[in-house]
């Protein structure tokens, strides 16, 4: 059991003892650099064995690992580095062109992790990772208090500036133990896990720590997680467990269907980060793959709920299972009153637990008042809970469409659209309307080789949702904008498409989007 990661020169294989030795060299290197205990250490890197060494070496040295989202805009990258107060940043050579424009403004020391790519000249004088590790003797793990900070992750910032969430050593350990439970992520000894969620996003869902605890083997894809590259890696490394967000499984569906690659090693899929429509889940369970449908947030490390849908299941519903062990859930109304778990009543979902954040890093952040209530996290999700505790997310509070005083769920409309065989991806947003207040607009990506028009979409939806839910505005697009972690970016959709849709309405173009694609 060990770690395999993609390098430009080929696959790199490491055992867990080798990872441990190098992690303790990371700790010794930070001592040699004169970095104080408790300081934040940034990582600006893809998924790979060096990043894993930082995952263990930085917290075990008594410092705090800040995994920086490499896909953020430069201004936001500068903001999160400054807000976390990173003292050292470990940077993959292949990512130096991204960080180069900020180099003169960074207070932090930079250490270059050579991955075979050319290093931007502005980093020529910065120390190299391998030379630094070779120059020190591995240290012993530093004893820390269980409530001491282990890592910092920032939210995706889809509603404003990203928020810093701090995870303690205690929360990381308990979260990892929960991931080993059979009704959790079910990580077990002997698994070979390929996480296609990035290591800069919510600690890679905790999988690097859970895998080390099991122990299980890890396979890292590096910079290229495109479906063909992932398929080649699966064929070569034979992972039994894959982890990724729904948009990735939408793309991978066609790769599985093509039969071009041997993907038979895959037995289980972990899916979270957004809604996975039943039609998508069914495609994988029909292939004999167990599918874990989960809900969580950065503020929750991220595990909140989950359910295993067994291979070839005859019942696939759009629900997210029950709460993870040690996590409490409740529904509240606008006044904070607790609502019934009857499978019908909807309200805002709140959560608490040993790995659920109680506040953001900045004590003066106004969001601490808005998002936290006496130990409970206000998730911003509208949901219903069944008497047995099964969670169903209805929508995000900011994504609901209020039409004529009644609510329309964008999530339920997107589930219905996903069931159409020609729809690859879709997103529903609210468009202001003089008569009704808001009306839904559907933005749809059609599968290559298929044709679709608005009349067909309206007919299809009319058989599945209330007639007044059917979107007034339907637009076919080449692609949907994504956030830095691959989720559909509803904020950008609103900014970019709502003015466009409203202008068409103003011109009396009632059938915009008509035509065949």
Image (cartoon, rainbow, N blue to C red):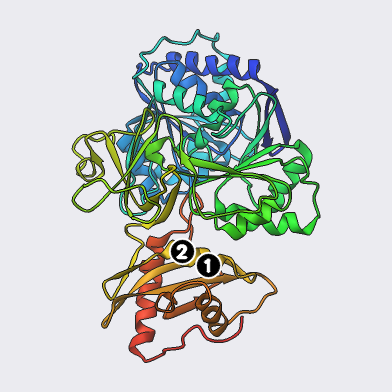
> Which of the 4 image quarters holds residue 36?
top left
Q: How many marks?
A: 2
How far separated are the C-alphas under marks 2 and 1?
A: 6 Å
Q: Is residue 39 above or below residue 136?
A: below
Which quadrant does the C terminus fall into? bottom right
Query: What secondary structure is found at the residue carrying circle 1?
Result: helix
Q: Is residue 351 above or below residue 279?
A: above
Local packing at callout 1 (Cα closer than 10 Å; few below 14, some 14-19, many 20+) is many
Residue at x 63%, y 26% (from the top left corner): 188
Residue nearer the viewer, 25 or 362: 362
- Check residue 412 in the rendering and tell me which mark sits there, or answer none: 2
Cβ atoms under marks 2 and 1 closer than 8 Å: yes
Residue nearer the viewer, 389 or 177: 389
Q: Is residue 462 above or below residue 200?
A: below
Query: What secondary structure is found at the residue carrying circle 2?
Result: helix
Residue at x 49%, y 77% (from the top left corner): 475
The location of residue 189, given as percent across then percent down, is 66, 23
The location of residue 275, given as percent across then percent down, is 49, 54
Q: Is residue 156 above or below residue 30?
A: below
Local packing at callout 2 (Cα closer than 10 Å; few below 14, some 14-19, many 20+) is many
> Which of the 4 image quarters holds residue 5?
top right
Residue at x 61%, y 57% (from the top left corner): 280
Which quadrant does the N terminus fall into? top right
Residue nearer the viewer, 474 or 362: 474
The location of residue 24, given as percent across then percent down, is 53, 14
Q: Is residue 128 visible?
A: no
Q: What residue sits right under mark 1 in the picture?
A: 416
Specify whether 463 is left or right of 328: right
The location of residue 364, given as percent across then percent down, is 18, 38
């Amino acid at each position: 059991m060990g770690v395999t990661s993609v390098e430009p020169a080929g696959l790199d294989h490491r055992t867990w003892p080798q990872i441990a030795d190098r992690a303790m060299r990371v700790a010794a290197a930070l001592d040699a650099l004169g970095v104080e205990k408790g300081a934040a250490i940034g990582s600006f890197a893809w998924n790979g064995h060096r990043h894993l060494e930082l995952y263990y070496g930085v917290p075990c040295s008594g410092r705090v690992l800040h995994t920086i989202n490499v896909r953020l805009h430069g201004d936001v990258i500068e903001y999160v580095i400054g807000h976390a107060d990173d003292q050292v940043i470990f940077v993959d050579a292949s990512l130096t062109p991204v960080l180069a424009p900020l180099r003169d403004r960074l207070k932090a020391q930079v250490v270059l992790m050579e991955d075979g790519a050319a290093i931007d000249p502005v980093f020529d004088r910065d120390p190299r990772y391998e030379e630094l590790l070779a120059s020190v003797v591995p240290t012993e793990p530093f004893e820390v208090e269980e409530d001491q900070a282990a890592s910092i992750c920032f939210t995706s910032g889809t509603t404003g500036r990203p928020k810093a969430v701090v995870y303690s050593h205690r929360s990381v350990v308990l979260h990892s133990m929960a991931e080993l439970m059979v009704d959790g992520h079910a990580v077990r000894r002997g698994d070979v896990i390929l996480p296609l969620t990035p290591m800069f996003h919510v600690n890679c869902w905790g999988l690097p720590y859970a895998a080390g605890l099991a122990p299980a083997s890890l396979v890292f894809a590096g910079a290229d997680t495109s479906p063909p590259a992932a398929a080649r890696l699966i064929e070569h490394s034979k992972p039994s467990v894959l982890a990724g967000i729904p948009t990735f499984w939408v793309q991978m569906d066609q790769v599985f269907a093509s039969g071009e690659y041997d993907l038979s090693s895959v037995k289980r899929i972990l899916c979270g980060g957004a809604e996975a429509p039943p039609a998508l889940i069914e495609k994988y369970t029909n292939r004999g793959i167990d599918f874990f449908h989960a809900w969580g947030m950065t503020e929750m490390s991220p595990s909140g709920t989950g359910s295993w849908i067994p291979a070839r299941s005859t019942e696939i519903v759009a629900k997210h299972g029950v709460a993870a062990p040690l996590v409490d859930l409740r529904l509240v109304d606008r006044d904070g009153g607790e609502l019934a778990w009857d499978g019908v009543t909807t309200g805002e979902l709140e959560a608490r637990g040993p790995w659920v954040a109680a506040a953001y890093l900045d004590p003066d952040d106004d969001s601490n008042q808005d998002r936290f209530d006496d130990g409970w996290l206000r998730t911003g999700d509208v949901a219903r809970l069944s008497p047995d505790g099964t969670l169903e997310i209805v929508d995000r509070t900011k994504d609901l469409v209020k039409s004529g005083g009644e609510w329309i769920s964008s999530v339920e409309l997107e589930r219905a659209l996903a069931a159409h065989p020609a729809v690859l991806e879709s997103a529903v947003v609210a468009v202001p309307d003089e008569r009704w207040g808001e009306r839904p607009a559907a933005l749809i990506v059609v599968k290559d080789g298929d044709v679709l028009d608005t009349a067909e979409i309206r007919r299809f939806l009319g058989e599945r949702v209330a007639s007044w839910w059917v979107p007034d505005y339907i637009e076919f697009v080449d692609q949907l904008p994504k956030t830095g972690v691959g989720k559909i970016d509803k904020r950008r959709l609103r900014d970019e498409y709502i003015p466009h849709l409203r202008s068409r309405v103003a011109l009396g173009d009632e059938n915009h989007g008509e035509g065949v694609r």
